[in-house]
Amino acid sequence: MNLLDLIFPKRCVSCGKVGSYFCKICTAKIKFITHQICPVCEKAAIDGATHPCCQTRYSQDGLVSFFSYDGPIRQAVKLLKYRFVSDLAKEFVDLIPFSSFNNETMKQFNNVVLVPIPLHPSRHKFRGFNQAEIFGKLLAKKLNIPVRADILKRVKKTIPQVEMKDRKKRLTNMEDVFSVDNLNLTMKQWNSVTIFLFDDVFTTGATLRSASNILKRAGAKRVWGIVMAHG
């Protein structure tokens, strides 16, 4: 145990027990997503692929979620949104059942690149970090795929989605929020890139929907959403 652990011991995000951010008892309460959903209609879908009847030219091609957004998972996400704890982020990602990304699953994707959902520059400056980028880099390292945090830009400052209860307002809130840089050059270099668009939580799907739309309009062929939790 190092000096920092003595001064600031790790505590379970749920019950507060000293030792780790996810104690054995609370870890057992975590609900893993076993059945993926279509990101458009949010009904059950094989491997999370968008239903053919839901697919449009600029829609997301699929969605993979790892956890249900409640209990220890909800508490960990909230903590990491407002306070960067590197050890917590690593323990969180280590909970992911990477069997979800077995060889057969990954064979359907070519030239995969992970693109984290960006914060608006002013919010990034205020927080000092982007939790989606931190999570995304840890996840990409596990999957041995590259990360491109320079492709997607947030150009419109919005009210945080968590502060909005009305679904329609959430959807409207995310209109014209993103722009794309460097993607055309990337598309020339890569024959058929699949973008893993990464965010921490999927609620209404408005953020991923808006980002997927702008990426598709800029030339991306396949865009899948990947999130830590769905709720």
Image: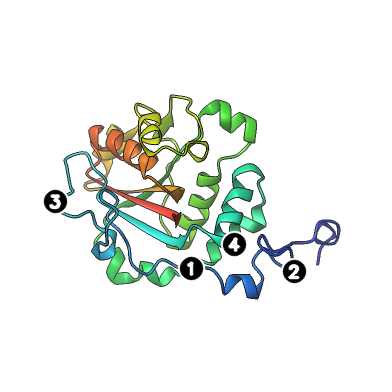
Q: Amino acid at mark 1?
A: Lys
Closer to the chain start, of discs 3 and 1, is: 1
Residue 49, by quadrant, is bottom left
**Secondary element at image label 2:** loop
Label 4: which residue? 72
| Quadrant of the snapshot with the N terminus | bottom right
Q: Nearer the viewer, residue 142 or 117?
A: 117
180 sits to left or right of 10: left
Q: How is the image coloured?
A: rainbow
Check if mark 2's residue and mark 1's residue have beta carbons within 8 Å.
Answer: no
Q: Earlier in the sequence, mark 3 or mark 2?
A: 2
- Residue occupied by mark 1: 31
Mark 4–mark 1 contact, CB under 8 Å? no
Q: Residues within 10 Å of mark 4 (few under 14, many from 20)?
A: many
Left or right side of 116 for 19: right
Circle 1: element type: loop
Q: Secondary structure at mark 3?
A: loop
